[in-house]
Image: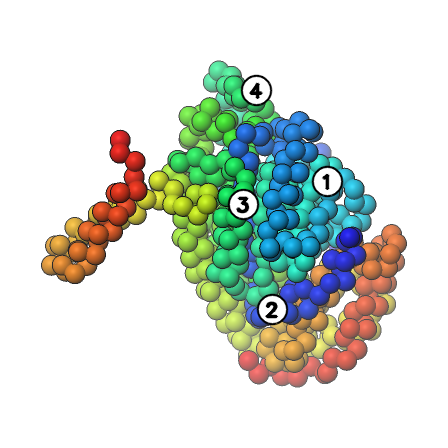
């Protein structure tokens, strides 16, 4: 079993096996849990971390959702493979950086568990499109099964106990990955981001690492985890996402109406460059792919092509490019391989038309 | 291309960018990965948290968890606690900053095995008691009867004190 299986397998996010939506790329629910009677990973001794990992791997692999799951121990994986898992959002950079962390990933890559990250257990469920309820239902089921098989650290007053005070209580981080080219092009993103922040929601870039949101993609998540029920947290996020989707569509329509042929020209130029460039950096390709994704949403390109763009965004990340090639590449080498894959994938795309939506 | 931003600690290229909004004022901070990891910059709230703790514990006496020997000095360094038992030990010291990052300090979400936490029962009870008073005032006796049953059911789940 290797990370190559993860790369080769078709999953919701890369092959549109689930429902897709124009603005919301994916919905994610994360629960932080800890075993009672053990120090948190950052304070535990190596032998204790090993014991924690064994117990958690054992408990998760027994659950039906994790039947034939991938089990990865970070210490056993080469750098490149760990980087692929990070780029897929299946593990965090922090987990990948340590030796004692492990990950259990379901066959369909919908459910994943990080073990011995900041908390003993970080359970994550991801679905393509906007499906907060469906995502939560799966997480809740898994959490219930977990509570029955592992003794979890819990207090009546503080809820689920976590290593960091920012996660205590529900341990729930609910988030949506949203594509906002309209708001970015219209120059409204700062304002929107500030409003979200003031109402208790965090706004991060695609990889959460602040490098100017690549491809106009942002992750919106709740900050407060204590004193609110899971339901209230999700309702709050849901209300904002619904409003954000509306604002994004308004911005796109306004832009298309105001710019007229220049709106279509921007998309057509992006398609032109992506279809013929010999070198493409990650940032450049992400921003141009973002134009094409918007074009698919708005009828300038067939909607059925959108999943190709989503796949190219994921597979165009550095570790993915190198893993597919099976060797380490320098920056030019990566840009060349990335450009080649994109050229090939976009060769069958039709010409860009006027927006219909 | 514009010049990359420098880390505000060590002058390396900054790859972690934090924007924090406090009382309408925007603060931007830039860190390289190494310095960000040291400061726990992965989460803006943690940053704020670390500041509060630093301020609070410079005068406070050392607190040590009897289970895992984790101390307030360790917390100042990492912004994380040592084990689940640290929570009651550090709770009093953390109360102010918990209220600051979380706004509320009583859990009202799920408990293990899908049961309701006591906090949630108390919370629902409070809501139902408010609603029943309003229903009676509005002479909506159907709603009042339903709420009365709900209150009885919720009260039965609370331990007798």
- Decide if residue B96 is on the left or right side of residue A64: left
- Check if mark 1's residue and mark 4's residue have beta carbons within 8 Å: no
Q: Are the two marked residues, 4 and 3, in contact with CB atoms closer than 8 angstroms?
A: no
Mark 2 = which residue? A18
Q: Position of residue B76 (x, y in %)?
A: 56, 26
Mark 3 → mark 1, Cα distance in angstroms:
26 Å
Confirm whether circles 3 and 1 share one chain: yes
Is residue B149 left or right of A20 when viewed as pictured?
left
Give the label, 4 or 3, closer to the camera.
3
At 44% across and 50% down in the image, what residue appears?
Answer: A230
Residue A282 is tagged as none
| Foreground tag (3 vs 1) | 3
Q: Earlier in the sequence, mark 2 or mark 1?
A: 2
Q: Secondary structure at mark 1?
A: helix
Residue located at (71% from left, 61% from top): A314
Q: Are marks 2 and 4 on the same chain?
A: no
**Dot 4 corresponds to which residue?**
B69
Chain ID, mark 2? A
**Residue marked by disc 3:** A146
Camera sees residue A166: no
- Percent x, y for residue A180? 58, 64
Q: Position of residue A44 (x, y in %)?
A: 63, 28
For this view, does A200 lie left or right of residue B33?
A: left
């Amino acid at each position: 079993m290797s990370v190559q299986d993860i790369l080769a397998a078709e999953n919701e996010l890369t092959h549109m096996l689930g429902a897709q939506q124009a603005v919301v790329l994916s919905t994610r629910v994360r629960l932080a849990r800890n075993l009672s009677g053990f120090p948190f990973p950052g304070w535990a001794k190596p032998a204790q971390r090993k014991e924690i990992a064994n117990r958690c791997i054992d408990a998760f692999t027994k659950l039906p959702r994790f039947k034939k799951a991938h089990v990865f121990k970070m210490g056993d994986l080469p750098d490149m493979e760990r980087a692929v898992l990070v780029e897929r959002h299946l593990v965090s950079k922090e987990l990948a950086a340590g030796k004692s962390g492990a990950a259990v990933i379901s066959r369909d890559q919908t459910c994943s568990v990080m073990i011995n990250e900041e908390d003993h257990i970080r359970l994550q469920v991801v679905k393509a499109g906007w499906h907060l309820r469906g995502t939560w239902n799966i997480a809740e089921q898994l959490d219930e099964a977990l509570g029955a098989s592992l003794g979890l650290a819990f207090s009546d007053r503080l809820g689920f106990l976590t290593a960091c005070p920012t996660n205590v209580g529900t341990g729930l981080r609910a988030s949506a990955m949203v594509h906002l080219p309209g708001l970015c092009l219209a120059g409204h993103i700062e304002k929107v981001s500030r409003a979200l922040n003031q109402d208790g929601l965090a706004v991060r870039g695609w990889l959460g690492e602040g490098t100017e949101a690549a491809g106009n993609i942002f992750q919106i998540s709740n900050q407060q985890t204590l004193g609110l029920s899971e339901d209230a947290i999700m309702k709050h996020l849901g209300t904002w996402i619904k409003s954000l989707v509306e604002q994004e569509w308004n911005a796109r329509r306004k832009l298309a109406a105001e710019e007229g042929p220049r709106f279509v020209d921007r998309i057509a130029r992006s398609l032109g460059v992506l279809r013929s460039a010999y070198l493409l950096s990650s940032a450049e390709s992400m921003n141009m792919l973002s134009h094409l994704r918007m074009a698919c949403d708005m009828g300038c390109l067939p909607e059925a092509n959108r999943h190709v763009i989503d796949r190219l965004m994921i597979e165009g990340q550095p570790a993915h490019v190198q893993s597919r090639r099976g060797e380490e590449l320098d920056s030019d080498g990566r840009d060349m391989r990335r450009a080649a894959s994109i050229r090939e994938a976009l060769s069958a795309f039709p010409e860009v038309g006027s927006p219909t939506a | 291309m514009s010049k990359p931003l420098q880390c505000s600690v060590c002058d390396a290229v900054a790859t972690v960018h934090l924007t924090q909004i406090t009382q309408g004022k925007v603060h931007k901070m830039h860190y390289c990965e190494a310095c960000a990891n040291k400061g726990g910059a992965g989460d803006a709230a943690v940053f704020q948290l670390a500041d509060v703790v630093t301020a609070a514990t410079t005068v406070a006496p050392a607190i040590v968890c009897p289970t895992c020997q984790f101390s307030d000095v360790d917390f100042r360094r990492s912004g994380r606690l040592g084990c689940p038992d640290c929570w009651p030990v550090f709770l009093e010291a953390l109360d102010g900053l918990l209220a600051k990052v979380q706004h509320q300090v009583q859990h009202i979400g799920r408990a293990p095995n899908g049961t309701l936490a006591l906090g949630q029962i108390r919370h629902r009870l409070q809501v139902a008691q408010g609603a029943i008073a309003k229903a009676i005032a509005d002479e909506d006796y159907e709603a009042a009867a339903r709420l009365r049953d709900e209150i009885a059911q919720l009260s039965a789940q609370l331990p007798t004190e």
